[in-house]
Every structure is written in structure tokens, then in C-alpha cells.
Amino acid sequence: MSVVVNHLTYAYSEGGKPLPPTLIDLNFTIEEGEFLGIIGHTGSGKSTFVKHLNGLIASEKGVVTVDGHDLSEKSERKIVRSLVGMVFQYPEYQLFAETVYDDVAFGPKNMKCDEAEIKKRVVRAMELVGLDVDRFSSRSPFELSGGERRRAAIAGVLAMEPKYLVLDEPMAGLDPKGREEILALLERLRRENGCTIIMISHSMDDIARHATKVLVLEKGSVYLFDKPEIVFSHAEELMSIGLSVPNVTKICIEMNRRGVPIPKTICTENAFLNWFKEGRKHA
Amino acid sequence: MIQFQNVTFHYEKSSTPALSEINLEIAQGEFIAIVGHNGSGKSTLAKHINGLLLPTSGSVIVCGYDTKNENDILKIRQQVGMAFQNPDNQLVTTIVEEDVAFGPENLGIASEEIRARVDRALSSVGMTQYAESAVHNLSGGQKQRIAIAGILALRPNILVLDEATAMLDPSGREDLLRTVKRLHDDGMTVIMVTQYMEETVDCDRIVVMNRGRIVCVGTPSEVFRKQDILEKSNLVAPEAVKVRNELKNMGFEIPDDVLTAESLAEAVCLLL
């Protein structure tokens, strides 16, 4: 099963009149189990696109289906919302309950799970995000540190056990360790639970390291859609549209400029070190 | 120019101090980066520089004035400009040049002088062509540059940036950093609180905070050599430094002042 985006075009409107389209004729398929990184300049349509994935926005032009359910059908949206979990920017601003437990339990309660099932899900979600159940359950979300609050908010989404997890800049504002923790969590969800991850991020280093596919949006259109090593081998083009590239890619560009023919597809630390061990003999 | 003398600070209701025994001296014209984990006290420290927060014990002396002395606080704030995280919270009017003029107008400065200051400030941040634009049409990075222009129009000697790049996209961040570096080259003392290690490689000194204490102060090459302190402080070295360290572990000789992609590429090419 997968997410299929077919000729999707979308325009916001102002005072009843449509504005120039934010998304223009998007066509691609996000396969199950993928870690899709979405990159693009501010205003390129990234957030508008992901809002289509659970029907927060519905377009009249084009079709988005999740596991075959068409999001333009109102009756299908409810099913899709049980499949797709959304983590917005600064999700901790949406914490509201008196205790961490109640906050994480809110989703499964709304899904009409019974008490035993709710408890099971809350415990599992808190364990996944690394919040100790005994220590944190009865604490107020507002007493937690920034990183803990972020993880509590994500646990609330995970408790609904989504098959597809969509995250809009989940690492923004966190310290380096906090960022690594979120990324490790996403990797674990994908490997152990088979969860498909769809993540918007400005951190090219993180995208290069973790994504299995990268979608580059530029002015509402698909600019590139490919494996990270292929996408970042187009470094000059990406920079010409105002995007950044992974730091390892920058090192490789500088080496090429100095006459060392290191492949343009090298964009992670590991790939770089491997080349250094194996390939440099030929350089 | 700025002295922290044994500063300890408690937020009300909090049992643990947000700052403990801070001693730090910052010289005129220095570019200082303050880094640390979420909740390490780095923003709390920054807010002491213009007296937004006052020490529970100890003193902060800015340009010879003690921030605890109420009569001097205005003089301190004329010296110290502060920029914060969210660009939308720092702009007060709808048109760019009006926003930049807001500060000097409040000081009752003559209008020709205001005009000159606004023009100068906008040119310092590279936003002259946007003088008459509507603020809401600007990108996040541009808004932050306008917020900084508004500060520059007050002619401070010290600029404090409290995670001013945190909400910007990469090109907005680069824009702002370039602007800040230029201001520093022109003589401004800059104190920059940041979460992004890549932003610190060009500064004079890095201050590493952990649980309210300063655990390390040094030049970028000195600080990024101290893997154990970084790790204990929940920090990660810039990508180029990580690659450099791996290569060193493999037995290659790379100097400690290699901190950027460019300098690493240069060093690596010499190895081949």
C-alpha cells in the first residue's frame, strides 16, 4: 500500500478569489516503509502539501489516495485520519491536558478504544519516545523541559498508532542531542513498526543520513524526487534555487574544485569515510 | 566591556538555579557564541546583559554600569541591543522604514537625524531597497534583518542575539549570519546564543553552558577538540569537525583549526 499523488494542484483563495496556485500538478508515489524527506524554500508548498495527506486541505484538482482511500471523498477522510498521524511545527504548543498520561491518551480515547487498550497504547507510545511511564505519567506537560515536551506531543500522535507519520520540522528549536533523539525515534518506528515517515526538514545533513527518498519542491512543483544521493548530486541546481546541501556534499564540491574527482553522490559522513578507505587509491 | 562576576540566578518557583557562579569577561569588539542544551541557561545569561534579568547574587557590569543600579539601566540599554527568536514578535509597524525609525523616534531625536540613522541601518543589513515595503511581505530572514536594523538605529555598541536564527530557513540563517559578521567586522561587540554549531566556527570564543554553569570557554578550534565536554553538554560538533575527527581516528594528520567544509576539503586534498 502507498500514498499516491496524482495531478494534485491547489490554490488558496482570498475574498472568494483564487490566488496563484501553491501546488502545481504534483505526481508521485510514496511507498510503504519509506522515509521521505521533503525540502524546499519557505513558501515552496511543503506544508500545504502535507496538509493534504490527512485531508486538512482538500483539492478539487487532482487526487491523493492513502492505501487506496481517496481523500477527496469526505466519507474516506475519517479512515485516512486513522492511518495518518500529523506532527506539526512546535507540537508542544498543542499540549493541553493536566497530565502527560491524559494528553497522550486523548487520541486513543477519541478513537473509542477501551480503557485497557488506551493504557496499553499510552505506555507503548511513552516508551517509544523515551519518557519513563512511572516518572512522567502524572506530571504536568508544562513542567517538562523543551525536549521532553516535544516528545510528549509526539507520543500523543503515536498513541493513535498511525501507519504513516507526517512531521513538519520536528527538530526545530531542539538542541543537537534532542534532534538526534527524535531522529533515532523515527528510525526505530520505521524499522520496528514498519511506519512510513514523511518529514519536512531544513537540515540537509539529517535528510542525507536518514531519508530513503527526497522530494524537492520549488514554487509548488516537483523539482526533484529521488534517492538522497541522487538529489544531492544536483548540488549546484539546489543552491541555485536557494537551497542548502549537506555539509559532506560541500566538502566534496570543494575537493572537486581542487581537482580531486570524488563522486558527487557522496553526501553522508559514512559514504565519505568509505570512499576515503577504498576509493582514494584511484584518485 | 561586559563582566559577569560570580552571577547566580534563580527563577521564581524554581528549586534549582538557572545560572550558577558565572564568571565571564567579554572585551570590546569580541564575537562570542553561547551554546548549550535546552534549558542550560544560555538565554538566561544573555538576558542579563541588558538587565532584562537581574542576578540573584553577584553582579553584571556593562560598560562600567552595574545592571542592578536602576538609575543606570537606560544607559546600559542604549549600549546593548537585543534580537530574539521570533521575527514576528519584534516588529511593531507595517512599513519597513517606520519600524526602523520607531526606536529613535521614541528617544525624541530630530527628524533629519532619524532619516540618516534609518538609511544607515537599512544599508548595514542590506535592506535599503525594501525601505517602503510592507513588513508582512518579507521573509523570516528579512524580518530579522529589519529587527536588527531597528536596533542599529539606536546606535548600540553591543548586539545580543538570542537564538535569532532558530526560526529561519537555511538561506535566511545565512543572510542573517552574514549581516552579523559584517557588523562585527565594523567594530560591533556581538554575543550570539545559538543551537547551531555550524554558526559558531567563525566567532572569537565559544562559551559552552551546561545546567546553568559555564563548562568551557575557548576559541572554536579549542572547544571542538573537547569531544567529552561537548558530549556531556548534549552538543554535537559541526559536521566537518565530525568527519575530521573520524579521519584523525583513522590515523590521518589534520590540524585542529579545520572546522569548515572548505578548510577540511583543503586539508584532505593534501593527504591524497
Image (cartoon, rainbow, N blue to C red):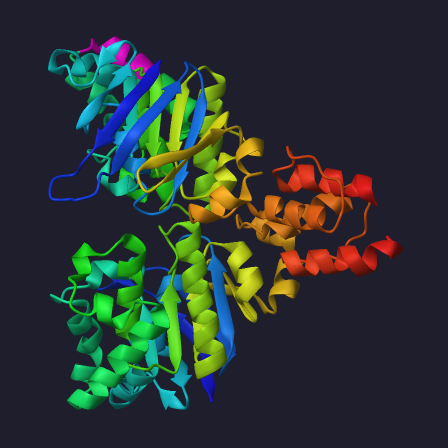
Magenta span: B109-117
Outermost residue toward the right in this view: A282
Can I make out residue B213 in this image? yes
In magenta stretch: residue B175: no
Vertical comparison of A123 with B71: above or below: below
Left or right position of A38 against A265: left
Vertical comparison of B209 with A143: above or below: above
Left or right position of A193 against B264: left
Left or right position of A279 against A202: right
Residue at (40, 81) in percent of width and height:
A64
Prevailing secondary structure of the magenta residues: helix
Circle count: 0
Q: Which of the pair B42/A230 is nearer the observer?
A: B42
Residue A166 occupies quadrant: bottom left
Can I make out residue A218 in this image? no
Residue B168 occupies quadrant: top left
Residue A47 occupies quadrant: bottom left
Q: Which of the pair A35/A6 is nearer the observer?
A: A35
Residue at (40, 29) in percent of width and height:
B127
Which x, y percent locates residue A78? 25, 86
Which x, y percent locates residue A10? 36, 69
Left or right position of A17 against A273: left
Which x, y percent locates residue B216? 45, 33
Q: Which of the pair A187/A46 is nearer the observer?
A: A187
Vertical comparison of A246 with A79: above or below: above
Which x, y percent locates residue A209? 57, 62
In magenta stretch: residue B112: yes
Residue at (31, 28) in percent of width and height:
B22
